């Protein structure tokens, strides 16, 4: 069998190096060399050694993980080996959260105990209401979430004991249980409505609808179809391997703060329109298009680079996002209850036009998880600015699973990437009195190079 090594010849010195290739579960996906093995390759004795350069980490494995597997070319997504389609069809969000965190599907007793634990931790400290009062009436609920989940760290100072498995487990339960409560409080704060207390007889998603929408009735009865649709949407959004926000959770987690602070950072990363904020951006885009017959002109604008087709494209999926397919079928069930969202017609036409247009085909741009989710959320009665919050709630389980896997990985240390320095070489301080003319003259004389009397315009050295 061929040796699993890479032989590298450095043509600057003629020297050759052999570095081992290692694999993950699937040889065709996990073949890697250790970047550290490149450091031995030097042009001279005092050379720092080779590094790899990979802006945005598009071709760099930052960790080993057993949580989620994505095959972007074949549109495959599995949580701990289970296909997303089967989990969406047969599981519940809390069962999937258990699977992501513990690695196995729970048995009856484990699921009952887990569900009970989460149910009994859905309340938040009454002081959190004072945090909510501090936000403007029109505060974006995602900004409220980032703030309040970070604030929770001050109510559980013991959460800093991240080395203690029992302490981690308690914080994980608290976070999964309290995110829907914080989300509903942000929603009701915006509307000047009183906060609702949890109903422990309801399911995780049923109680979330209760927290959001109960008014004067003695007991809130969630619509079973909407309750199930939310379960499916939460399952689909629960994890997605090393995406931007999971990576943020790991990066912050690597310096060992409490999980509330780390999760606040992950939620902030998710908020961006290129990530979890895309579902909100999709609805605003569909609103701007206004009607099906304006789709063609909009698509031409996208192709001209005027803007992006939000909800399309993905760093990993170069095929249809399997989650988008499931969401599309879930939409039909929701619309039976809510009536069809008129924006659906525009979205379907956008998809039809884009999937038949060379611009999108050659760039392998397909609908992603965010393209249809917003249409369902809006039909269910959620305002557009709640959409990223509806992403953050279920992703909490994934973020926490990634966080704990990081803490238990003996190879992981505080995250500290290197850089290629290409700034100014050493130069002397220029007194204020001399800066004006001379440095401008200097800069002009050097064709815009760094202003300094002695420095040559040599490019900066690469420093590790
Ligand atoms: C999520 O990583 C995850 O797993 C994320 C996620 C999860 O579950 O955590 O799946 C959730 O964030 C889904 C993505 C939601 N974002 C959007 O829908 C925003 C719109 N999509 C993009 O901006 C974009 O597709 C990204 C951000 C999703 C991916 O960007 P990449 O991989 O950096 O791709 P790129 O920007 O390098 O684009 C490659 C080419 C470019 O064209 P050229 O410069 O080569 O001519 O494709 C073009 C881009 O201009 N392109 C798009 C486009 N996305 C990429 N053109 C138009 N519309 C788009 N949506």
Image (spheres, helix red, strand yellow):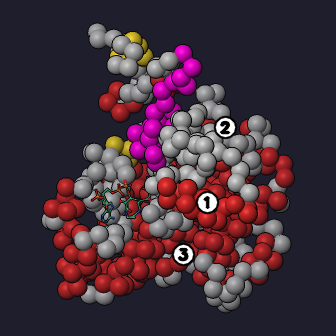
* Label 2 CB less than 8 angstroms from ligand 1: no
Q: Residue at x 60, y 82 (%)?
A: 213
Quarter in which the C terminus is drawn: top right
The residue labelled by disc 2 is: 414
Residue 302 seen by the camera: yes
The residue labelled by disc 3 is: 386
105 w.r.t. 177: above or below: above
Q: Is residue 300 left or right of residue 133?
A: left
Q: Is residue 292 magenta?
A: no
Q: Nearer the viewer, residue 334 or 124?
A: 124
Mark before the other along the chain sequence, 2 or 1? 2
> What segment carries the magenta color?
45-64
Badge 2 marks a residue whose secondary structure is loop
Q: Nearer the viewer, residue 69 or 295?
A: 295
72 w.r.t. 338: above or below: above
Q: Are marks 3 and 2 in contact (CB under 8 Å)?
A: no
Residue 114 image offset from top left, x and y in percent: 65, 50
Residue 132 image offset from top left, x and y in percent: 74, 77
Quadrant where ligand 1 appears: bottom left
Q: Residues within 10 Å of mark 1 (few under 14, many from 20)?
A: some
Residue 438's tag is: 1
Q: Can you tell which quarter of the image residue 435 is in? A: bottom right
Q: Is residue 330 left or right of residue 294?
A: right
């Amino acid at each position: 069998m061929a040796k699993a090594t890479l032989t590298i010849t450095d043509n600057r010195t003629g020297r050759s190096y052999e570095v081992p290739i290692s694999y993950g579960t699937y040889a065709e996906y996990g073949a890697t060399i250790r970047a550290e093995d490149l450091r031995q390759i030097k042009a001279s004795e005092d050379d720092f050694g080779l590094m790899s350069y990979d802006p945005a980490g598009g071709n760099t494995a930052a960790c080993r993980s057993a949580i989620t597997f994505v095959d972007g070319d074949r549109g495959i997504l599995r949580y701990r080996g289970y296909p997303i389609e089967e989990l969406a069809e047969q599981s519940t969000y809390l069962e999937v959260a258990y699977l992501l965190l513990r690695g196995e599907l729970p048995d009856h007793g484990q699921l009952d105990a887990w569900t009970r634990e989460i149910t009994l931790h859905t309340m938040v400290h009454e002081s959190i209401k004072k945090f909510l009062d501090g936000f403007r009436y029109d505060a974006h609920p995602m900004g409220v979430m980032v703030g309040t989940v970070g604030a929770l760290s001050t109510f559980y100072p013991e959460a800093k004991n991240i080395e203690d498995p029992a302490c981690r487990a308690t914080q994980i339960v608290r976070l999964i249980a309290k995110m829907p409560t914080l989300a509903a409080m942000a929603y009701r704060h915006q509307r000047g409505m009183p906060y609702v207390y949890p109903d422990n007889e309801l399911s995780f998603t049923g109680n979330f609808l209760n927290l959001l929408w109960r008014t004067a009735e003695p007991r809130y009865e969630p619509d079973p179809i909407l309750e199930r649709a939310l379960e499916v949407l939460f399952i689909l959004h629960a994890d997605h391997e090393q995406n931007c926000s999971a990576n943020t959770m790991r990066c912050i987690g690597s310096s060992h703060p409490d999980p509330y602070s780390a999760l606040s950072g992950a939620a902030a990363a998710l908020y961006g329109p290129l990530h979890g904020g895309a579902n909100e951006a999709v609805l605003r885009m569909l609103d701007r298009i206004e009607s099906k017959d304006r789709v063609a002109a909009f698509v031409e604008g996208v192709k001209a680079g005027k803007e992006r087709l939000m909800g399309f494209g993905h760093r990993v999926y170069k095929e249809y996002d399997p989650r988008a397919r499931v969401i599309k079928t879930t939409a039909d069930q929701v619309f039976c209850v809510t009536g069809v969202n008129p924006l659906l017609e525009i979205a379907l036409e956008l998809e039809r036009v884009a999937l038949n247009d060379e611009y999108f085909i050659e760039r392998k741009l397909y609908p992603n998880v965010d393209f249809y989710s917003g249409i369902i959320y809006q039909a269910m009665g959620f305002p557009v600015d709640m959409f990223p919050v509806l992403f953050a709630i279920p992703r909490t389980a994934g973020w926490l699973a990634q966080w704990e896997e990081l803490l238990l990985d003996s190879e992981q240390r505080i995250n500290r990437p290197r850089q290629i320095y290409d700034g100014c070489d050493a130069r002397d301080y220029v007194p204020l009195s001399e800066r004006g003319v001379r440095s401008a003259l200097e800069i002009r004389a050097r064709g815009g190079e760094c202003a300094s009397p002695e420095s040559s315009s040599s490019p900066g050295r690469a420093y590790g």
